[in-house]
Amino acid sequence: MSTATPSAFAHITPNWFAAAMGTGIVSVAAASLQHEVAALHVVADLFWFLAAAILIALIGAFAAHWITHRDFALAYLRSPAMFPFYGAVAMALVTVGSATGVTGANYLGHSAAVTISITLWVLGTTLGLCTYVVMMVRLVRDAGMATAMPFWLMPVVPPMVSATTGAAVTTHLTEGALRTSVLVFCYVMFALALSAALIIATAVARQFADNRARGVDAIPFNAIPSLWIPLGVIGQSIGAANLLADAARHAVAADTADALHTFGLVYGTAIGALGVVAFIAVTTVTIRALRGGLSFSLGWWSFTFPIGACAVGANAFGIATGSQLILAVAAALLLALIPIWATVAARTVNSIRSGALPAPA
């Protein structure tokens, strides 16, 4: 590695893209809720603008980082602690692309918005599958050599996000083999992400149990925000199961579509119940940590995307079941997310200004 004094560019790590993820999901969630509420259009538009601006700035800074400080960039890529956050890059692309496909059409025109949306989906999905494969290879190769942590989910979750947003992508494709193939591909990504998430969640749970047995904290104090990441998987998977089932009605035979719809309902019911319990537990732990002096870090962006993902999942499940109660839960999650986003965003800006965090550009 170079011995030159690192500049601000040397600190542009992939976890900065969590800011684009956390901002974009607000737009996606707002756009997915009931459209007759005028305020939701304002929220979707505002957060799409912000997410797009953040993503463009980060892509530019990240590219400059790789050009001017390639040694640092390669070190981050090889780092077991930093590599998982390349999943944030993939998810940022897909999330902002999804928001562009819905909200961006009002400003860019339908054709341009759809083109950008699909392009970002393809790029994000490709990168997400790469992070997935690399992470799974590392898990097999280095089994038992590192402490399992919730952020290990970051590189394997992108295919689930691609599956969820892929439902909308299929609506822009011509009917026939292409649309059906993309739908099947999305279900394959759903299965890949879910199976990997279960493997990692089991390893994390075992690690936490071992820590408690040894009389140490189940998770390092400053890593508590990462406990929210599994909730993102839960929300995205419920959304994927039900959004893809709805998309299937225009791509496969009626009996197959009905079976997929039933699967979405059963899956949403079972995993949704688990999600409620997990949400309460993680919220309780987080409140205690905040009261105990949890210091700010970029990890706080983990408070945003999972809540937005749960809002999207709850909305999709509410529409599939026709439940006004579940739709109300989705709206409540969005209402809770906006002040949380504002807090994390403000703390990020203040920390950059004070020098506590390196600037992303």
Image (cartoon, rainbow, N blue to C red):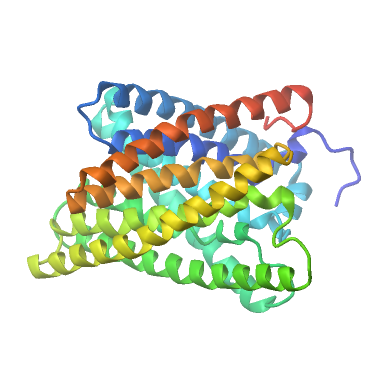
Q: Quadrant of residue 84?
A: bottom right
Q: Quadrant of residue 143?
A: bottom right
Q: Is residue 204 above or below residue 100?
A: below
Q: Indicate the quadrant containing the C terminus: top left, top right, bottom left or bottom right.
A: top right
- Is 170 placed left or right of 280 in the picture? left
Q: Is residue 350 above or below residue 25?
A: above
Name the residue nearer the viewer: 283 or 74.
Answer: 283
Question: Residue 148, percent across and down?
Answer: 67, 67
Question: Residue 320, percent across and down?
Answer: 20, 53
The outermost residue toward the left is: 254
- Is 302 placed left or right of 148 in the picture? left
Name the residue nearer the viewer: 78 or 307.
Answer: 307
- Is 89 placed left or right of 219 in the picture? left
Residue visible at 40% across and 39% down in the picture: 333
Is residue 208 visible in the rendered image? The answer is: yes
Residue visible at 13% across and 65% down in the picture: 258
- Is 86 placed left or right of 65 in the picture? left
Q: Quadrant of residue 193?
A: bottom left
Name the residue nearer the viewer: 274 or 241.
Answer: 274
Residue visible at 89% across and 40% down in the picture: 4
Question: Residue 173, percent across and down?
Answer: 21, 50
Q: Is residue 58 above or below residue 121?
A: above
Question: Residue 19, percent across and down?
Answer: 56, 37
Name the residue nearer the viewer: 158 or 281.
Answer: 281
Residue visible at 56% across and 69% down in the picture: 200
